[in-house]
Image (spheres, rainbow, N blue to C red):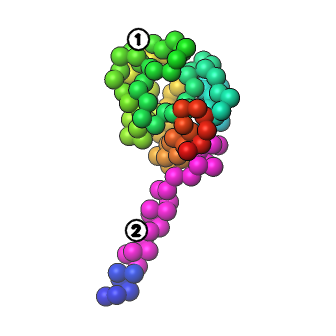
Amino acid sequence: MRSMTVAATLIVASAAAAAAQDVAKGQQVFAQCRACHQIGEDAQNMLGPVLNGLDGRKAGSVPDYAYSDANKKSGIVWTKATFTQYIKNPAAMVPGTKMTYAGLSDEQKINDLWAYVSQFNDDGKKK
């Protein structure tokens, strides 16, 4: 009976480790975001807004970026849950958004990407 409990614990621990967020892998996933977004201490708005301080930020609130009305009026506050939903299909979550990205469906890549972007404060320094 004890060996079954140990085996079950190891399986659960392995599944949790597999689902863990990996900042380094998230940085690799962010490479596809770089065409439109910057992040870090020297980040500037480009085709898309700077992603510094994304965790807890209200959508449409980066100064000096021309958001779509749809984004400004979305009422979204960026959390892991809202980011996960949005990045899968931005146009479905915010019809009328300027973000033309087709979406990311791989849950692990989404988790890794969130781990990477959410580590930056408003000033672009890592937490």
Q: Position of residue 15 (x, y in %)?
A: 44, 63
Residue at numbered disc 2: 12
Please check the rendered image and state whether residue 92 is part of the magenta-colored stretch, yes or no.
no
Instruction: Please report the bounds of the magenta region as a residue range.
Output: 7-28
Disc 1 residue type (three-letter): Asp
Callout 2 secondary element? helix
Q: Residue at x 42, y 35 (%)?
A: 56
Residue at numbered disc 1: 69
Q: Nearer the viewer, residue 40 or 88?
A: 40
Question: Would you call the spot at circle 1 few (<14 residues within 10 Å), some (14-19), or many (20 or more)?
Answer: few
Q: Residue at x 53, y 25 (%)?
A: 101
Please check the rendered image and state whether residue 24 is part of the magenta-colored stretch, yes or no.
yes
Residue 115 at least partly seen? yes
Q: Position of residue 107 (x, y in %)?
A: 47, 46
Q: Nearer the viewer, residue 111 or 1?
A: 111
Q: Position of residue 97 (x, y in %)?
A: 44, 17
Quadrant into which the C terminus falls: top right
The secondary structure that dominates the magenta segment is: helix
Q: Nearer the viewer, residue 48 or 93?
A: 48
Task: Describe residue 17's horizontal placement relative to residue 7 as left or right.
Answer: right
- In the displayed structure, 19 sits above or below 98; it is below
